[in-house]
Image (spheres, rainbow, N blue to C red):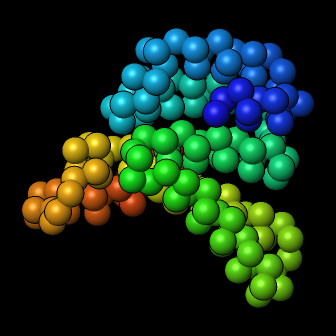
Amino acid sequence: MVEQFVALHREIDPPLCDILCEVAENANFWQHLHPGHIQRLLEIIGPINTRYLDIHGLKDVCLLIAKIVDTYSSFTATHSIMVGEIARQLARWMQLPEPTCQQIQIAGYLHDIGKVYIPLSILEKEGELDDEELSQVREHSYMTGELLKRL
């Protein structure tokens, strides 16, 4: 997944792409995608983010985030990516300006990033969720907002 993204978008930031490829090969990288680690990492890297991306670069980065979130659970597979694509098509159908369509697509990509805070045992549970599990699922929208505040 990372290699495909980098091959398509190396022009965004070649040194960053090289680092991403190197880090992604390490099993610890994927283990650190545990929900508690993500917030800590965002707090660490947040203050040094001084690079600004155009809408296309932002869309590419958000697509990568969506792919990472979607692979967290087999239940979500390509959900966020499809939400982004469908949202953009609906925006175009409504004849909204193209920059607005792209922003809507990005929102679709990121709408569920808070799901990484839900334990896999709940996301992939067969059968009905109990009240506590439902509460955790409902909390993902709040966590999405908290994560987006840091981007």
133 to the left or right of 63: left
For image coordinates 26% across by 43% down, the residue present is 119
Q: Is residue 108 above or below residue 72?
A: below
Corner quadrant of residue 89:
bottom right
Residue 47 visible, this orientation: yes
**124 vs 65, nearest the viewer:** 124
Residue drawn at (10%, 64%) of the image: 131
Q: How many marks?
A: 0
Asked if residue 45 is positioned above or below residue 107 in the image, the reply reads: above
Residue 151 in sight: no
Residue 92 in the image, given as x and y percentages of width and height: 80, 79
Q: Quadrant of the C terminus?
A: top right
Residue occupying the point 79% across, 39% down: 52
Q: Residue 2 occupies which quadrant of the picture?
A: top right
Judging depth in this view, the residue of 70 and 54 nearest the camera is: 70
Lateral position of residue 20 relative to residue 135, left or right: right
Residue 133 position within the rendered picture, expressed as x and y whole percent measured from the top left: 17, 56
Q: Position of residue 28 (x, y in %)?
A: 44, 14
Q: Quadrant of the N terminus?
A: top right
Residue 16 is situated, as x and y percent measured from the top left of the image, at 74, 21
Q: Identify the residue at the far bottom of this view.
A: 94
Residue drawn where x is 71% and y is 27% of the image: 3
The correct choice, above or below, for 100 with respect to 72 in the image is below
